[in-house]
Amino acid sequence: MDMPPSVTPGPRGRKGDVTRNQILDACEILFARSGYLGTSLRDIAAEAGVRMGVVHYHFGNKHLIMDAAVERKLDLLRRTIVESFDTAKRGGQSLDAKDAITAFISPFLQAVADREGALQNYIVMTSHLMSGYRIPELRPVLSKLSVVSQILIDHLKDAFPGVSDEALLAGVYFVEAALIFIVQDPGFLDDLTGGHHSVFRLDELTRRALQFFHGGLSSVLTSP
């Protein structure tokens, strides 16, 4: 049984940090595979190779574990996207819509295709967790991911001066909704294309994906 949210997390020594990271690594794998509701504390403990009491000791309950799992690499993801935009703006030039979409989308597709990368499970996990927005207690945790969306919003405002907030936010929503499904897809792409494309080779679809996102977003942002 989950302990109440008031439980104080355990201490943070070297051994404690190692154990915490084991648990959070397990969370990334399980939340990416089965989502929040489909993962139990017992599942997390088994995947991490620790006792249930150790999970409770470090985090208290599943909600606090999810919060820690989202926080742990959020700054890494944000910095990765910022660096992608900085690279695209090398020389100081402003970005057009195609450049902005490329700078935002490419790191996600590349990271998900890199099974050994630090962000692979994290990106799939956070995409899967977005379906938990209907759970009231999870919304404050998931809303932290908006710092990443804001990077795209700010650059699109520069690329489309004068665009209405209604059109801008609708366009960003459509981009992110499609991207969320793409990166959490467990096999639909493989089945749909008869193995011609694979969710494990999303980086190979980058050019096509960018054509799709750029065309759709530009249409939304420039239509009256």
Image: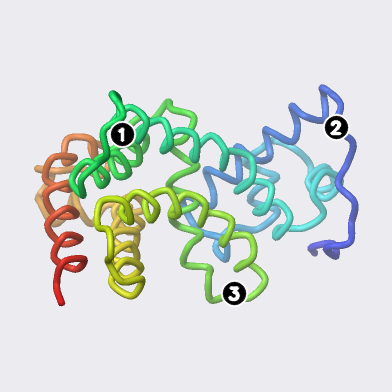
Q: Quadrant of residue 4?
A: bottom right
Give above or below for 80 relative to 1: above
Q: Nearer the viewer, residue 82 or 107?
A: 82
Element at label 2: loop
Element at label 1: helix
Residue tagged 1: 110
Left or right: 153, with 64 as reference point: left
Type of the residue with mark 1: Gln
Q: Quadrant of residue 95?
A: top left
Q: State yes or no: discs 2 and 3 in contact (Cβ < 8 Å).
A: no
Q: Nearer the viewer, residue 16 or 167?
A: 167
Q: Quadrant of residue 5?
A: bottom right
Q: State yes or no: discs 1 and 2 in contact (Cβ < 8 Å).
A: no
Cα–Cα gap, marks 2 and 3: 30 Å
Sort mark 3 into few (<14), some (14-19) or many (20+) by Cα contacts within 10 Å: few
Left or right: 57, with 183 as reference point: right
Residue tagged 3: 135
Residue tagged 2: 12
The earlier-in-sequence mark between 1 and 2 is 2
Residue at 52% from the left image edge and 51% from the top image edge: 147
